[in-house]
Image (spheres, coloured by chain):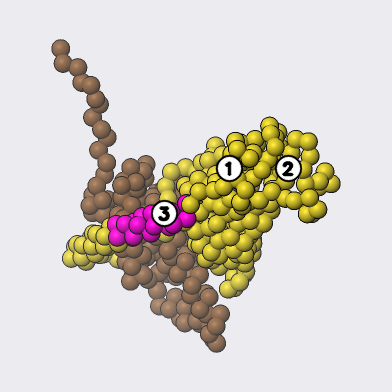
């Protein structure tokens, strides 16, 4: 029996794209790139202008006695000191000798989730001097809701707190998008609402470690805009297995520690 | 004595070179994977267009053509997925139509199309294109070891089927 490669080569040779067609294709490809460049430029200019206008409108400064607010292009964050009598996450009370609880509220457009930002909360005394400071990466957990409230414990107070400020850096640290989503070949079931995917990770925010990982086992948390699903993928190599993923694939983001950066190449649309 | 202060840069392959060298091969490989010349040409064009749009980065990759294959296979996979979704809402499967179409093909093509899609891809990448397990794995989005195993299974399945056809 002939070699398989010979058989395939023989079959493949039955297809012979003509030079004319090849040249036409090349021209189409070039034209597409030119159009894309123009569209990208226009879009970038539009976004830059819109971002500038939003920033001018929302960055109005904060005062220690008022709930602080931070305006980023697509979300609003406010923080306030909890008052005596308000419920708090633990039994130690709203304020102790060296700590105070604050309440943080974030709202955003569910269609336009803010992603990960580096945020800093500061406790300020009556003179506006910082008496406690806390910085962490922030990502809304349930993006579908468009709103999230939580408590933060501000530690190591060096003075009497009178107000709180919250600021998030405008730079979005994650890059939304999973590079490739595909049903694994073994998957036979498929319908419009339930599928099993392998998700290839491309990018994540620096320093945003969610779980311990080893080189042959990736684990992370995933968020989806709609039908928020996810969590606890099991997998190995460059792959995460995600079950019951929503169909809004474009809105997913994956955040994993930077030391496991995916090898080069971008395979997303 | 003159001293060269910089080493000559490794020449990056131009998109036109890649296109000229690989286009026909790409179409042929995709034809074997999807069994349809028009579809293969369409996928090839789309994959190359996407590669060209990102050529600043793609051109510097170790294997730009590997990237193109990867894109093409992803596109093919998505089209199949879409078709399956569409079929969910349609009475009467098109499987019968496919079976009829297969009967009119050559033995080789019929044997290929009778393989599961992942095995078919492994066979084309490994046997027609001569990709290493690592390259084929990258193109299929799986590990090299899995690609090797898949190619092994594909060869066995293909031999079995083509043997029937030649018997």
The image's mark for residue A56 is: 3
**Label 2's element?**
strand
> What is the distance, in whole Å, between disc 1 and disc 2 at their CAs?
15 Å
> What is the distance, in whole Å, between disc 1 and disc 3 at their CAs?
20 Å
Crowding near pointer 3: few (<14 within 10 Å), some, many (20+)? few
Per the rendered image, the range of residues in magenta is A40-59
Mark 1 sits on what residue? A120
The image's mark for residue A253 is: none
Residues indicated by labels 1 and 2 sit on the same polypeptide chain: yes
Q: Colour of chain B?
A: brown
List x then y, in percent, for residue A108. Answer: 55, 61
Q: Residue at (73%, 42%) from the top-left corner?
A: A100
Chain under label 2? Answer: A
Crowding near pointer 1: few (<14 within 10 Å), some, many (20+)? some
Magenta stretch, main secondary structure class: helix
Question: Farthest residue in the left direction?
Answer: B1
Chain under label 1? Answer: A
Q: Residue at (25%, 38%) from the top-left corner?
A: B11
Image position of B98 with respect to A118: above or below: below
Q: Earlier in the sequence, mark 2 or mark 3?
A: 3
**Label 1's element?**
strand
Chain under label 3? Answer: A
- The quadrant in which the N terminus of chain B is found is top left
The image's mark for residue A100 is: 2
* Left or right of A60 in this view: B63: left
Assess whether mark 2 and mark 1 are in contact (beta carbons under 8 angstroms).
Answer: no
Q: Residue at (52%, 80%) from the top-left corner?
A: B87
């Amino acid at each position: 029996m002939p070699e398989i490669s010979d058989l395939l080569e023989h079959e493949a040779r039955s297809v012979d794209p003509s030079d004319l067609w090849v040249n036409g294709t090349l021209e189409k490809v070039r034209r597409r790139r030119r159009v894309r460049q123009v569209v990208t430029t226009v879009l970038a200019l539009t976004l830059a202008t819109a971002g500038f206008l939003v920033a001018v409108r929302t960055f109005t400064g904060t005062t220690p006695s008022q709930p602080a607010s931070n305006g980023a292009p697509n979300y609003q964050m406010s923080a306030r000191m909890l008052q005596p009598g308000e419920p708090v996450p633990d039994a130690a009370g709203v304020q102790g000798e060296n700590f105070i609880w604050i309440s943080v509220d974030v709202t955003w457009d569910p269609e336009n989730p803010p992603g990960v930002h580096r945020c800093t909360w500061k406790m300020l005394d009556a003179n506006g001097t910082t008496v406690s400071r806390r910085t962490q990466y922030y990502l809304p957990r349930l993006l579908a809701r468009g709103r999230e409230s939580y408590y933060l414990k501000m530690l190591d107070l060096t003075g009497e707190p009178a107000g709180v400020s919250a600021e998030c850096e405008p730079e979005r640290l994650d890059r939304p998008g999973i590079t490739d989503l595909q049903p694994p070949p073994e998957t036979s079931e498929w319908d419009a609402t339930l599928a099993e995917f392998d998700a290839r990770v491309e990018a994540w925010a620096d320093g945003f470690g969610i779980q311990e990982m080893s080189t042959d086992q990736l684990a992370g948390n995933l968020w989806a805009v709609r039908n928020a699903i996810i969590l606890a993928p099991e997998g190995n190599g460059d792959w995460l297995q995600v079950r019951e993923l929503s169909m809004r694939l474009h809105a997913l983001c994956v955040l994993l520690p930077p030391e496991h950066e995916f090898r080069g190449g971008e395979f997303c649309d | 004595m003159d001293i060269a202060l910089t080493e000559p840069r490794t020449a990056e392959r131009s998109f036109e070179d890649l296109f000229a060298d690989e286009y026909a091969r790409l179409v042929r490989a995709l034809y074997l994977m999807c069994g349809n010349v028009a579809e293969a040409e369409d996928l090839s064009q789309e994959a190359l267009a996407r590669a060209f749009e990102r050529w600043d980065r793609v051109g510097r990759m170790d294997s730009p053509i590997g990237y193109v294959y990867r894109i093409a296979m992803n596109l093919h996979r998505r089209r199949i997925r879409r078709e399956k979704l569409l079929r969910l809402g349609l009475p009467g499967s098109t499987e019968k139509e496919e079976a009829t179409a297969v009967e009119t093909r050559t033995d080789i093509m019929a044997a290929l199309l009778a393989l599961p899609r992942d095995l078919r891809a492994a066979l084309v990448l490994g046997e027609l294109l001569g990709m290493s397990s690592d390259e084929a794995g990258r193109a299929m989005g799986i590990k090299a070891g899995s690609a090797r195993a898949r190619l092994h299974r594909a060869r066995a399945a293909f031999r079995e089927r083509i043997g029937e056809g030649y018997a």
